[in-house]
Image (spheres, rainbow, N blue to C red):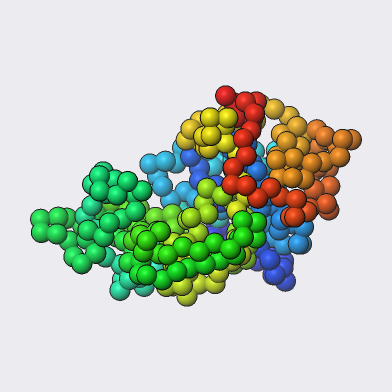
Amino acid sequence: MDPAANTPSTKNQSATCRGRFAPSPSGPLHFGSLVAALGSFLSIRAQGGEWLLRIDDIDPPRNVPGAADGILRTLENYQLFWDGPVFYQSQRFEAYAAALTQLASHSYPCGCTRREISAVSPNHRYPGTCRNGLPPGRQARSLRVYCGGQTLCFTDALQGRQCRQLDDDIGDFIVRRADGFYAYHLATALDDAFQQVTEVVRGADLLDATFPQLYLQQLLELPRPTYLHLPIAVTTAGKKLSKQARARAINDSPPGTVLSRALTFLGQPPPEELRGAAPGELLDWAIAHWQPACLPCSKTITTDADETGA
Ligand code: GLU
């Protein structure tokens, strides 16, 4: 492992803006994740900022051996080169543990199983069973953060103003899971701050995830980046492309062709003469011609069978 890993990038300290791509190594990159990588890359490069790569490998049961390296090779193949060393969340467990100590007065042990929660709460929002202490005979499993009646808002650079009432819309959320691993929201809020990320560009499937992250930023006094949630690619059946759903990896098609499609998906179609050109040439064009106003602001876009591998 690179000894310099997991220290904030020192290259170009004068850059004021910093974006990131944070894939989970649960499978090879598919078209949907390429769109997220490309959107965050172009947005930050068009502003002259740094683009960081973070591997969100905090979920060992879902980590697929070799997937992280495969993602790195695929990004290189598309000439989506990142700044500084690759950051691995699996090296940050001490920081996550320290944050849990800081959150002690805002969190409580919960003994509920997922099945028990969905039996009483069809939308999976936590019903508050263990909020005032574990019911008799129950063992602590996870650790949850209390969500009060506060309304949190942010202005998404693409989807517009977003507000949620923490209690009613989000519910007390997990920061340490029943299997002892740290939860995605905790690691993301901490690492976006640690990496000095100023702009989060990711798929609209994570729009609601922004609220627990904003709340943790507030509790832990972390800076708040700006957010832009891109439409996600869905199959004609309306299903999200996801690594777990075994969406076809993009490696089988020429990178210039896939990249041209991804640019078109983002409302930035390359001129006819550049369609299918080498990735470096396409990216140079796309950085120079990046038009955030042309991004489609729907939350989903249906992609054809060729891209989904259907
Ligand atoms: N690791 C998450 C994923 O692959 C994305 C995290 C984020 O962008 O906040 O879905």
Left or right: 182 as drawn, with respect to 139? right
Q: Residue at x 81, y 37 (%)?
A: 278
Q: Nearer the viewer, residue 218 or 183?
A: 218
Report the residue that reaches farthest toward the left.
137
* Residue 98 visible, this orientation: no
Q: Residue at x 27, y 56 (%)?
A: 127
Left or right: 269 as drawn, with respect to 41? right
* Residue 212 visible, this orientation: yes
Left or right: 47 as drawn, with respect to 64? right
Q: Quadrant of residue 173?
A: bottom left
Q: Position of residue 112 (x, y in %)?
A: 23, 52
Q: How many marks?
A: 0
Q: Is residue 32 above or below residue 144?
A: above
Q: Is residue 209 above or below residue 61?
A: below
Q: Nearer the viewer, residue 296 or 114?
A: 296
Q: Residue at x 58, y 30 (%)?
A: 236
Q: Residue at x 77, y 57 (%)?
A: 46
Q: Quadrant of residue 200?
A: bottom right
Q: Position of residue 187 (x, y in %)?
A: 45, 59
Q: Position of residue 188 (x, y in %)?
A: 49, 59
Q: Nearer the viewer, residue 2 or 44?
A: 44
Q: Position of residue 165 (x, y in %)?
A: 42, 65
Query: Quick one: quadrant of the C terminus?
Result: top right
